Image: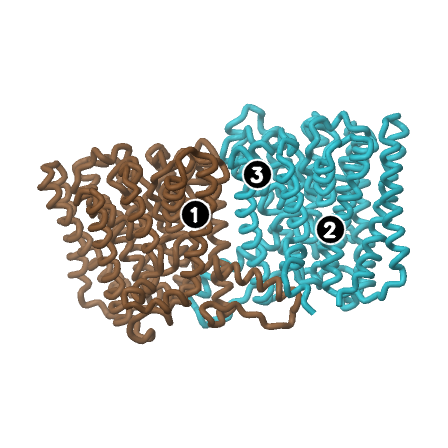
Chain colours: A brown, B cyan
Amino acid sequence: MINFKIILKILGLLVLMEGLFMLFGIPFSLYFHEDDLFPILISSLITAGTGGFTWFLTRNAAPDLGKREGYIIVSTAWIFFSFFGSLPFVIGGAIPSFTDAFFETISGFTTTGASILNDIEAMPHGLLLWRSMTQWLGGMGIIVLSIAILPILGIGGMQLFIAEVPGPAPDKLHPRVKETAKRLWAIYIIFTASEGILLMFGGMDLFDAICHSFTTMATGGYSTKQASIACFNSPYIHYVITIFMFLAGTNFTLSYFALHLRFDKVWKNEEFRFYVSFILGFILLVTAGLWITQDNGLEKSFRDAAFQVVSIVTTTGYVTADYLKWMPALGVVILILMFTGGSAGSTGGSIKMVRLLLLFKDGLLELKRLIHPNAVVPVRFNHRVVSTQIISNILAFVVFYMVITGFSVIIMGFLCSDLDTAFGSVAATLGNIGPGIGAVGPAENYFHLPAFGKWFLSFLMLLGRLELFTVLVLFSPSFWKK
Amino acid sequence: MINFKIILKILGLLVLMEGLFMLFGIPFSLYFHEDDLFPILISSLITAGTGGFTWFLTRNAAPDLGKREGYIIVSTAWIFFSFFGSLPFVIGGAIPSFTDAFFETISGFTTTGASILNDIEAMPHGLLLWRSMTQWLGGMGIIVLSIAILPILGIGGMQLFIAEVPGPAPDKLHPRVKETAKRLWAIYIIFTASEGILLMFGGMDLFDAICHSFTTMATGGYSTKQASIACFNSPYIHYVITIFMFLAGTNFTLSYFALHLRFDKVWKNEEFRFYVSFILGFILLVTAGLWITQDNGLEKSFRDAAFQVVSIVTTTGYVTADYLKWMPALGVVILILMFTGGSAGSTGGSIKMVRLLLLFKDGLLELKRLIHPNAVVPVRFNHRVVSTQIISNILAFVVFYMVITGFSVIIMGFLCSDLDTAFGSVAATLGNIGPGIGAVGPAENYFHLPAFGKWFLSFLMLLGRLELFTVLVLFSPSFWKK
């Protein structure tokens, strides 16, 4: 039997904490004398109250926590977070429609960054802080999920990281998750604080610096400005954010090693080398394209290229340049990069580097296998043989990703006025990126979509964020049997 | 060592036969008194002469024919065919540019149907017959390749058909290929003749009936009319062609069984059931969409839907309705159908039903495996367990297909004025379909693309037609070692 009591207990505790985190907006509400104080307080009360009460009712649940419970907690946590997290926007009417508020909030917690706001600067500061914080908390959740929980659930090749994670022996789930989370959150907080300070050096005010460092480290991409990072006309700020987006898209275990000065471990990691080369290659390509076709000079071409390539590859979704106005080939490059994603164990979404790398290796070896059908030609990763089970799991993941993209584009096709928008909205939400192409491009937003489209894309954000299988497994009859 | 002599011998023989087939255009040249008699004769002479001379020089080659020789023969045969096959167009100047003529011919032999002709009706009849015949011969080649040769080479799950093929024991390559080819060609010819007769009943003249039945059975899609099948304003003709496109997209071994009245074998085949359900499902969807959004009535909506869905799924590429003028969602449906393809063992290209079906099954089972990680959950096809090796081969194929699509779209992005054209041209050539979307849509053609684009798309046609690996394996260093 599934232990629903422990599920409710953990969810209750998480929602209680969410309610408390909401209060962080209050100093800004007070300082700016805006009318979001009351909505935040009420929302916090409802959220923390509901969470606390649920936790109280289930406090003596049996501590049996198995795989099934894990799947259910992970899949529903994001939904509950988004439901309660949208209250501050709805109460008080900053975002009048619940559909819009939920979309904006799940887009935050999934670190997607797809927005329905037409005038971000008009939002009160307390709510903008909460909006940025949904992404920051979502990023925290993802780090634990991808490094400590998904490997145990066996999702899409994440097993490969088990051995790499610093922490106690991998056989004890509970202390391990706790210890790993603590160490990685420390890095997350150090990086966030460092970015905030560096941004303030560049002239950004405290509020914007906090919000942008929150959403950078989460690879979320929510900005406090309608024009996103393009609003800050400072090369320094662009470069700082580019570097921290890159760090946010790096496996946090590697950052842990780097901060302990064990650079050998970092450079020996094949995914990291692939991630660096991949990004550099595409920055070069796009820089060349922009330099030749635009009159912005080499530095600006390089800066725009680096910023947008890193922003899309890491699935952050910040914008300094409207890539839809670039030459078509570069727009295509951006679209394709939406299917890459950052490293596994980062806050980035989409398919992710390690899967692309292993697929690439397996594909090349497949050619070898055709020529020597009786030879055993295993894929290696970080000098270790990868089991065929993991490879086929990864292949299935990618194929699922493509098939879900295909069917979703058909569904969105019925709701959008053109193919680009249908394709862009699916790629940008399933990949947790934010801005897409067409009418949901970097200069636009998702407000104009019909309500059904917003709910459907919300589902895609969740699906993408939880590596597909975590959610899909709940739809499998064998999950619920016995 | 690779036995190049036997390779040349077989290629020589094939090219000799190609030269003889060219002569079939002559009766039409004579009847219509057009100026293509001389170009056809000269081309036939050059082709048959070169082929015959090569064959003569290598006639006593050692008969050792291994896998490597197989790969080289298959990959280069289509290139040689297209080179010599373009001569009738170049000599005499019907298509002045060699790039264009080669594109048109490889598009024929790969049964793609992407054309560079701006005024098809202005072409002399002898050349139009040869143009249709390139597709018909290409279709013949593909039947042998996919049912008799690829399974032995172990390409992309084709092994699954070995047991199903009627013919002598599968351990003897040579007599087996010959016998299988004979039986399947008989069906191919019976179907072609039947369609031609039925089309003439519908009022089509002999010449058009021959050309269209040639290109239907090859799922090629070359028409003798600039407006394709839309030119024939006869529901009867549309339905006849729809049915024969469907047959051409069916595994020819199943047609063999059906003609021997063993319908149980046909219906028991899982791929066939999937193919039928898949097509019916999408016809219903598109019919509904067209009926609601257009004023054409139910019959015309159904007819257009059935024709276009079958035309794209089977990768034929005939056109009765410009799907780019449909509502965007239906355009998306058509684009996605470009990645499906007909059945394995048919003349259709693209990914193919059996692969999609097995991926779908494997994906669902992956969910089961996640819940029960220690259970052995194999994929079954036609009641038999499919080895994990074949599944991962199929997964690798699909991933390769997607990655090649992605990179090709980037390359075409540099040559096209918009994303749709880049995407459409790649999907339509790699999938051997013909018309794409954007500026290479059903009402347009490929003439306006730059020369490099035409050569690149020619390569994609070949790659798609030969199931990727057959060509890619030649680029693998281990192929050439030892």
Residue A320 vs B477, above or below: the answer is: above
Q: Are marks 1 and 2 on the same chain?
A: no
- Which chain is disc 2 placed on? B
Kindly check if marks 1 and 2 are in contact, taking CB atoms under 8 A apart as contact: no
Indicate the amino acid at tag 3: Gly
Q: Residue at x 47, y 44 (%)?
A: A333
Residue identifier under label 1 = A283
Residue A349 disc label: none
Label whose residue precedes the other's in the sequence (3 or 2):
2
Residue identifier under label 3 = B424
- Which chain is disc 1 placed on? A
Distance of label 1 from label 2 (alpha carbons): 42 Å
Residue A433, horizontal then vertical, whole percent:
37, 46
Residue identifier under label 2 = B142
Residue A475 image-quadrant placement: bottom left
Q: How many residues crowd mark 1 within 10 Å: few (<14), some (14–19), many (20+)?
A: many
